[in-house]
Image: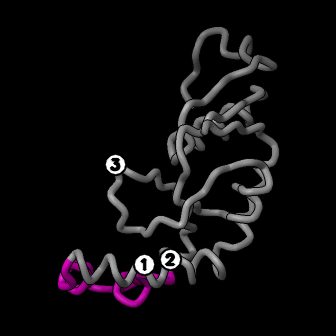
């Protein structure tokens, strides 16, 4: 953490983080750890996926000891259309199984999620990848969140 002159003066102040994807959550979490009261303003629904789901989805080709060049070729061998259809089937399975607890926790605190597929056009859907669903859910509960709509 870089040292900034008078950074201790920010303890106890309030901050608004606009945007609710990876950077927004990183900033909000850091502020919270440093005693800043954070409100996160979510501009649109967010597709949330845990690292556990990503590992389950891609673990067959991307795993410890895998030949990355081979894995990349296998992954790129499907057309975008086929990959999108596969993800359309897989997304509800991951949301209702592996990621159910985190999605329920986020919904409980007012975080607006979407079941858009992983391959959704990034200009139409925000995406958040969560490494640790339990601590992230706890952080979300500690922070007050507002959503626009």
From the viewer's side, name the closer residue of 34 and 104.
104
Mark 3, residue position: 123
Q: Residue 63 vs residue 24: left or right?
A: left
User: Count of labels shown?
Assistant: 3
Q: Is residue 121 above or below residue 5?
A: below
Q: What percent of the width, then of the height, locates residue 23? A: 50, 41
Is label 3 in a helix, a strand or a loop?
loop
Residue 17 lies within the magenta run: no
Q: Residue 16: name its quadrant.
A: top right
CB atoms of marks 2 and 1 within 8 Å: yes
Residues under labels 3 and 2: Cα distance? 19 Å
Name the quarter where the C terminus is drawn.
top right
Q: Is residue 74 left or right of residue 86?
A: left
For residue 100, which quarter of the picture?
bottom right
Query: Which residue position is annotated with label 2?
Result: 91
Residue at mark 1: 88
Residue shown at the point (66%, 15%) measured from the top left: 7
Task: Report the magenta residues as a range.
Answer: 56-79
């Amino acid at each position: 953490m870089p040292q900034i002159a008078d950074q201790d003066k920010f303890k106890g102040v309030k901050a608004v983080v606009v945007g609710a994807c990876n950077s927004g959550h990183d900033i909000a979490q850091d502020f919270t750890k440093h005693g800043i009261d954070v409100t996160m303003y979510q501009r649109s629904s967010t597709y949330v996926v845990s690292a556990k789901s990503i590992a389950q989805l891609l673990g067959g080709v991307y795993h410890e000891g895998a030949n990355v060049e081979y894995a990349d070729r296998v992954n790129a061998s499907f057309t975008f259309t086929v990959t999108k259809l596969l993800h359309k089937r897989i997304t509800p399975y991951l949301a209702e199984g592996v990621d159910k607890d985190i999605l329920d926790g986020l919904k409980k605190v007012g975080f607006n999620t979407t079941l858009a597929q992983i391959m959704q056009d990034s200009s139409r859907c925000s995406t958040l990848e969560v490494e640790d669903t339990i601590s992230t859910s706890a952080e979300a509960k500690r922070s007050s969140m507002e959503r626009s709509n």
